[in-house]
C-alpha cells in the first residue's frame, strides 16, 4: 500500500524490533563462516514475519548468500514435499547458471517423479525400495544437493508458512537441521503460532529439546511503536508540530485500539481510510475527518467472511451476539441471552475458538482474537438489528446478579447504542465520572459526549456540570479549542439556569485554560470570577478567586501582591477548615516565594502542601508541587539565589513528579515535570540525558500548544547548550523563549529569557546586544526581587566583568546583596559568590577573592553542581597563578580538568562532546596541561591501600615525619612508600603527587593544602 503522496508505508520490522534483526544478522554472519543453523520466526498473521524475512534476505544477499525460498499454502498439507518442490522449481526458473541447471536436472532424475517436468528422459524406473527406505534415500539426495550448493557460496534456505506444511517436508527439515552445524547453510522457517497442528508442534518440540533452533517470536507493536509507525508514514512535508497535531488523540487511539498493534491491520486500515477519503492530503498537510464510524478494510472483511461461512447456524448466532456485546464478553451473559445450557454453549464456544475467531481469556470470559474481527461482524448487521440487540444486552446486564458498577461502562455503551436515552444519560454520566477518577480522560470525553447527546434527545436543558467535566478532560489532554468550547458552553448553560456559582466556576476554568497561552486573557476571566465571588458573599469562592488573581500577579512580576492575595486566601480556608483549599494555597505560596527569590521560605510552604496532597491523594497537586520544589537546589535558573537543598536530593522528587503526571494522564503536568527534571540533570552536568528529557518536554508542550511551557522549556534547553559551549544553539532557544514569553504576556518568563539571552550574548562577545537587552530591563536603583530579575542582574555583572569594569561589577553585587547578608555567605547564591570572587580578583583584592571563590567551591561540591565547580576551579587556578602560587594553581587546574573530562564522557553526541572539550580545556593554561611528566603518568590501580593513604596525606601537605606520626610507622617506612608511589605514578616530586592525586580522584581539591 502507498499513500496518495506516493510514499510507501514504513516497514514495521524496523519498529520495535531492532534487537531481533541484529540477532538474526549475527546468525547470518556465523553461518557465512561455516557454523550453520536453524532460525524460527513465529507470530500471528500480519505481524510482520514476511517483512522480517525480507530484511534477512536483503542482508544475506549483501553477504554473498545464495537465496532459496519455498512457500507453503493451505492446500499443501496433503502434498508431500510441497515447499521443497516449490523452492526447486523457483530455483530452476530464476537461475542463469548452466552448472546449477545441470545439477538441478541431475537432482530431478534422482528424485523422480517428484519433479518430472525437469527430466528430459522418460525412461527412468522407480527405485523399487520400501517407502521408508525410499524416504531416507530422498532425504540423503536432497541434503547432499543443498550441502553441495554451500560449497560454492553460503546458502539461506527459507520455508515460509510452515503451519501449512506437509509431514514429509517437516521430517526432511528436521533431518537437514541436524546436518547444518558444520556447513554454511542457514535454514529459516516461519509459522503462525495460532495455527499450529500436532505434527508441527511435535517438530518444534524436537528442535527445542535438541537445541537446534534460535526462535524469534514477533509480538504486536506497542502503542508507542504504533505512534512511531504512524509518524513515519505521515512525515512527508510535515513539520514535527503539524505531525503531532495530526496524529495526536483520536487517530492514534483508534488505530491502536482497533488494530491492537498488528502491522498488517494498521496498513490495511490506513489504506481503507485513505481510499474512502477519511484521511486526505490537502494544501500541503495531512488531515482527517472524524473516525467515529471507522470502515473495515475489505481484506479483513473477506477473511472474516470466509471463517464465518464454515460455522454452524448456532455458532453464527452466538458470534453475532458476542460482536454486539463487545471486544470481551462473559460466558454467563451469552447463556442469559441464548438460553442455552452450559454444555451446549461450551460446544459452540469451542467451534468459535477452532475457527480462530475467539480466544478464551478465563473460565468465565472470552474475547475476539482481533478487535477488527469483532467490528467486521458487527458492521454486517442492519442498523435496527444493532439497536434491538444492544437493548437486549443492556436489559440483560441490568438483571445480572453482579453489582451495576461492575458493568457501568457496558451499560452506558449499550443503552446509548440502543437509543434508550434516559438510562443512557444516567449511565454515561456515571461512567464518565468513573473514567475521570481513573485518569482515563479520552474515555471520559466519549461518555460525556454521549450524555450530552442523550440530554438533547430528551429535550433536557444542557447541564453545565457535564460540559465542565468534558472540558476538564479535554484540558488534561491538551485539547485547547475543545476545552474552551466546553467551558464557554458550561458558562452559557449556567447563566440560562441563573446558576451564579456555575458561572463563577466557568470563569475560573477559562482563566486557568488561558494561563498557558495569554496572561492578558487570564486576568480578564479571573477578575470576573473575583467579582462574582464577592457578589455571592461566599468565603470559599472568594478565597479561590484570590488564589487565581495572586497567581496572575506572580506571572506579571508582582510577587508581593501575589503573596498578599495568597495569605488572605489561606486565612479564609483555615477559618473554613478546608484542607484541600489550604493545600492548594500552600502550593501557590511556595511558588510565589520561589519566583519571588526566596527558595528557603518557599520550601517550607511546599513541604506542607506536599504532605496534604499526599494525604488526600491529589495527584495533580502533588506532581506540580514535587516538580517545582526541585528549584530549591542550585540549578542554572536559581543559582543567583540561596539554595535549600542539593541537586542529588531534588532529582528523585522530579522523577516522582514525572511518574505521577504520567499516571494521571495530565499532559501539561508531564511537560512541566520533564522540564524540571531536565533542568536538574543539566545543572549536574548530565547533558545528554538533560537534552533528551527537555526535547520530550518540548514535544508535548508543542503538541498541546502550551505556550508558557514552551517558553520555559526553551530556556532550559538553552541553559544546557550554553553549559556545553554550544552557544549558537543556546542563543536560538533563548530567542524562541523570549518571543513566546512576550506572546503570552508573561513578564516573569520575559525576564528569565532576557537574562539568559544577555548572558549568552556576552559569551558570544556580542556586548552591544547584551547592553540593548539589559537597557530596558536592568535598573540598579530598584532591588532585584524575583528569580527573573536576579538572572538579569547576573547578566549585568557578567557584562561589567567582560568589558573590564570590576568595580562596577562589585557595585552591582553589593546592591544585589542586602546589608544583612554581606557577611553571611550561606545566604548567597552560588553564581553570586563566583562572580564576586572573580570581580575581587580582577580588582586585585586577592585575599577577599580567595575567600569568595573557596566558599563558592565548597557550595558547588555540596550541591553537586559540577558545571559550576570546574569553572570555579579555573578561577581559583587563575587567582593562584597570578600570585605565583604554582602548586595551588596546578591543583585547581587538575581538578578542573578532571571534572571537564567527567562531564564530557557522558555526552553521547560526538560533535558536541569534542566541541565542549576543546572550548573548556582552552580555558586552562596549556603549559600546565601538556607537560611530559603528566602525559607519562600511570593510573592509580597499582597502589596498595597503605600507599593510597600516604598519597592523601601528601596531598594535604604533610611531611614524611607527620605522615609517620599519623600512620604510627617509622619515617623510613614512609620514605619507602613515597618512592614506590613515585615509581608507580610517574611523578618526580611531592607536588606532582598531589596534583596527580586530584586528577585521578584520590582526593578532592578542597582536601588538599600546599605540599612541602
Image: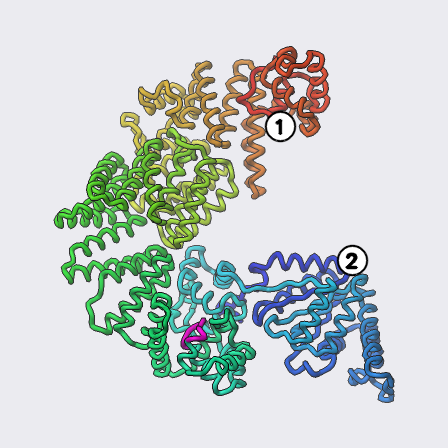
Q: Which residue was labeled with disc 1?
A: 1000
Look at the image and say whether residue 71 sits in the magenta stretch.
no
Within 10 Å of disc 1 (Cα), the crowding (few <14, some 14-19, many 20+) is some
Whether 641 is drawn above or below 77: the answer is: above
Write the residue at 61% across / 70% down.
193
Q: Residues within 10 Å of mark 2 (few under 14, many from 20)?
A: few
The residue located at (33%, 73%) in the rendering is 398
Q: Position of residue 305 (x, y in %)?
A: 51, 82
**Which residue occupies the foreground of this view, 729 or 1012?**
1012
Q: Which mark is residue 33?
A: 2
Color style of the picture: rainbow
Judged from the image, the secondary structure of the residue bearing numbered disc 1 is loop
Q: Position of residue 1003 (x, y in %)?
A: 58, 24
- Report the front residue among 690 and 166: 166
Foreground: disc 1 or disc 2: 1
Q: Residue at x 82, y 68 (%)?
A: 147
- Which residue occupies the foreground of this view, 821 or 896? 821
Q: Are marks 1 and 2 in contact (CB under 8 Å)?
A: no
Region in magenta: 324-332
Amino acid at each position: 500500500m502507498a499513500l496518495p503522496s506516493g510514499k510507501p508505508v514504513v516497514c514495521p520490522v524496523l519498529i520495535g524490533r531492532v534487537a531481533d534483526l541484529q540477532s538474526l544478522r549475527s546468525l547470518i554472519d556465523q553461518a557465512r563462516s561455516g557454523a550453520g543453523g536453524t532460525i524460527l520466526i513465529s507470530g500471528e498473521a500480519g505481524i510482520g514475519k514476511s517483512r522480517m524475512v525480507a530484511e534477512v534476505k536483503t542482508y544475506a544477499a549483501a553477504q554473498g548468500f545464495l537465496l532459496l525460498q519455498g512457500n507453503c499454502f493451505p492446500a499443501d498439507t496433503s502434498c508431500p514435499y510441497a515447499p521443497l518442490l516449490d523452492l526447486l522449481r523457483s530455483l530452476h526458473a530464476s537461475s542463469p547458471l548452466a552448472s546449477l541447471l545441470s545439477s538441478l536436472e541431475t537432482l530431478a532424475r534422482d528424485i523422480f517423479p517428484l519433479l518430472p517436468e525437469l527430466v528430459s528422459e522418460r525412461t527412468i524406473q522407480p527405485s523399487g525400495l520400501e517407502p521408508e527406505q525410499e524416504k531416507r534415500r530422498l532425504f540423503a539426495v536432497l541434503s547432499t544437493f543443498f550441502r553441495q550448493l554451500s560449497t560454492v557460496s553460503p546458502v539461506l534456505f527459507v520455508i515460509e508458512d510452515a503451519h501449512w506444511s506437509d509431514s514429509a517436508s517437516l521430517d526432511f527439515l528436521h533431518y537437514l537441521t541436524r546436518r547444518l552445524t558444520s556447513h554454511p547453510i542457514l535454514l529459516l522457517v516461519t509459522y503462525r503460532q495460532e495455527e499450529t497442528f500436532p505434527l508441527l508442534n511435535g517438530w518444534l518440540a524436537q528442535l527445542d529439546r535438541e537445541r537446534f533452533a534460535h526462535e524469534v517470536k514477533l509480538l504486536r507493536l506497542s502503542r508507542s511503536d504504533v505512534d512511531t509507525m504512524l509518524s513515519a508514514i505521515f512525515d512527508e512535508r510535515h513539520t514535527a508540530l503539524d505531525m503531532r497535531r495530526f496524529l495526536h488523540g483520536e487517530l492514534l487511539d483508534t488505530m491502536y485500539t482497533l488494530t491492537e498493534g498488528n502491522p498488517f491491520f494498521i496498513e490495511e486500515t490506513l489504506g481503507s481510510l485513505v481510499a474512502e477519503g477519511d484521511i486526505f492530503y490537502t494544501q500541503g498537510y495531512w488531515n482527517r475527518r472524524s473516525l467515529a464510524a471507522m470502515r473495515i478494510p475489505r481484506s479483513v472483511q473477506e477473511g472474516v467472511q470466509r471463517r464465518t461461512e464454515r460455522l454452524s447456524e448456532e455458532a453464527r448466532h452466538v458470534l453475532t451476539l458476542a460482536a454486539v456485546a463487545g471486544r470481551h464478553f462473559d460466558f454467563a451473559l451469552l447463556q442469559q441471552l441464548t438460553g442455552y445450557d452450559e454444555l451446549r454453549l461450551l460446544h459452540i464456544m469451542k467451534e468459535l475458538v477452532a475457527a480462530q475467531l475467539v480466544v478464551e481469556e478465563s473460565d468465565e470470559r472470552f474475547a475476539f482474537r482481533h478487535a477488527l474481527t469483532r467490528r467486521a461482524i458487527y458492521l454486517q448487521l442492519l442498523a435496527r438489528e444493532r439497536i434491538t440487540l444492544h437493548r437486549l444486552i443492556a436489559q440483560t446486564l441490568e438483571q445480572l446478579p453482579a453489582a451495576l458498577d461492575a458493568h457501568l461502562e457496558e451499560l452506558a455503551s449499550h443503552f446509548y447504542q440502543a437509543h434508550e436515552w434516559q438510562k443512557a444519560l444516567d449511565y454515561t454520566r456515571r461512567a464518565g465520572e468513573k473514567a475521570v477518577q481513573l485518569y482515563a480522560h479520552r474515555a471520559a470525553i466519549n461518555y460525556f459526549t454521549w450524555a450530552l447527546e442523550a440530554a438533547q434527545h430528551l429535550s433536557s436543558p444542557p447541564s453545565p456540570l457535564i460540559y465542565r467535566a468534558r472540558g476538564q478532560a479535554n484540558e488534561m489532554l491538551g485539547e485547547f479549542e475543545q476545552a474552551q468550547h466546553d467551558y464557554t458552553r458550561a458558562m452559557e448553560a449556567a447563566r440560562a439556569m441563573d446558576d451564579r456559582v456555575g458561572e463563577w466556576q466557568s470563569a475560573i476554568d477559562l482563566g486557568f485554560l488561558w494561563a498557558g497561552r495569554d496572561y492578558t486573557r487570564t486576568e480578564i476571566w479571573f477578575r470576573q470570577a473575583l467579582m462574582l465571588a464577592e457578589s455571592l458573599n461566599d468565603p470559599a469562592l472568594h478565597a479561590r478567586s484570590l488564589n487565581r488573581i495572586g497567581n496572575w500577579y506572580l506571572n506579571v512580576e508582582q510577587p508581593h501582591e501575589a503573596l498578599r492575595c495568597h495569605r488572605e486566601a489561606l486565612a479564609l480556608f483555615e477559618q473554613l477548615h478546608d484542607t484541600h483549599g489550604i493545600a492548594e494555597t500552600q502550593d501557590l505560596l511556595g511558588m510565589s516565594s520561589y519566583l519571588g527569590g526566596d527558595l528557603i521560605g518557599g520550601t517550607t510552604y511546599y513541604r506542607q502542601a506536599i504532605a496534604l496532597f499526599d494525604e488526600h491523594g491529589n495527584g495533580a497537586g502533588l506532581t506540580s508541587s514535587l516538580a517545582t520544589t526541585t528549584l530549591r537546589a542550585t540549578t542554572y535558573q536559581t543559582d543567583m539565589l540561596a539554595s535549600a537543598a542539593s541537586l542529588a536530593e531534588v532529582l528523585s522528587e522530579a522523577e516522582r513528579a514525572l511518574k505521577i503526571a504520567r499516571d494521571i494522564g495530565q499532559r501539561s503536568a508531564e511537560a512541566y515535570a520533564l522540564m524540571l527534571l531536565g533542568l536538574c540533570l543539566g545543572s549536574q552536568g548530565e547533558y545528554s540525558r538533560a537534552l533528551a528529557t527537555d526535547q520530550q518536554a518540548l514535544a508535548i508542550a508543542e503538541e498541546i500548544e502550551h505556550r508558557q511551557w514552551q517558553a520555559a522549556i526553551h530556556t532550559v534547553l538553552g541553559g544546557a547548550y550554553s553549559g556545553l559551549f554550544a552557544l549558537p544553539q543556546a542563543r536560538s532557544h533563548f530567542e524562541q523563549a523570549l518571543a513566546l514569553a512576550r506572546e503570552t504576556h508573561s513578564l516573569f518568563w520575559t525576564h528569565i529569557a532576557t537574562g539568559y539571552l544577555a548572558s549568552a550574548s556576552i559569551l558570544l562577545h556580542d556586548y552591544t546586544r547584551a547592553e540593548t537587552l539589559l537597557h530596558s530591563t536592568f535598573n540598579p536603583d530598584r532591588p532585584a526581587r524575583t528569580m527573573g530579575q536576579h538572572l538579569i542582574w547576573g547578566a549585568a555583572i557578567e557584562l561589567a566583568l567582560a568589558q573590564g569594569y570590576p568595580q562596577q561589577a562589585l557595585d552591582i553585587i553589593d546592591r544585589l546583596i542586602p546589608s544583612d547578608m554581606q557577611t553571611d555567605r550561606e545566604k548567597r547564591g552560588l553564581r553570586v559568590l563566583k562572580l564576586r570572587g572573580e570581580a575581587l580578583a580582577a580588582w586585585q583584592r586577592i585575599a577577599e577573592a580567595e575567600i569568595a571563590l573557596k566558599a563558592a567551591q565548597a557550595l558547588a561540591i555540596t550541591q553537586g553542581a559540577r558545571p559550576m565547580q570546574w569553572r570555579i576551579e579555573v578561577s581559583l587556578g587563575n587567582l593562584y597563578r597570578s600570585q605565583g602560587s604554582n602548586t595551588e594553581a596546578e591543583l585547581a587546574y587538575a581538578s578542573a580538568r578532571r571534572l571537564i573530562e567527567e562531564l564530557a564522557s557522558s555526552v553521547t553526541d560526538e560533535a558536541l562532546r569534542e566541541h565542549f572539550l576543546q572550548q573548556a580545556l582552552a580555558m586552562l593554561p596549556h603549559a600546565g596541561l601538556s607537560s611530559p611528566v603528566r602525559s607519562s603518568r600511570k593510573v592509580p590501580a597499582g597502589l596498595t591501600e597503605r600507599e593510597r593513604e600516604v598519597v592523601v596525606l601528601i596531598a594535604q601537605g604533610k611531611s614524611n615525619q607527620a605522615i609517620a606520626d599519623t600512620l604510627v610507622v617509622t619515617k623510613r617506612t614512609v620514605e619507602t612508600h613515597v618512592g614506590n608511589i613515585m615509581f608507580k605514578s610517574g611523578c618526580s616530586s611531592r607536588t606532582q603527587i598531589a596534583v596527580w592525586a586530584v586528577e585521578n580522584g584520590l582526593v578532592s581539591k578542597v582536601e588538599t593544602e600546599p605540599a612541602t
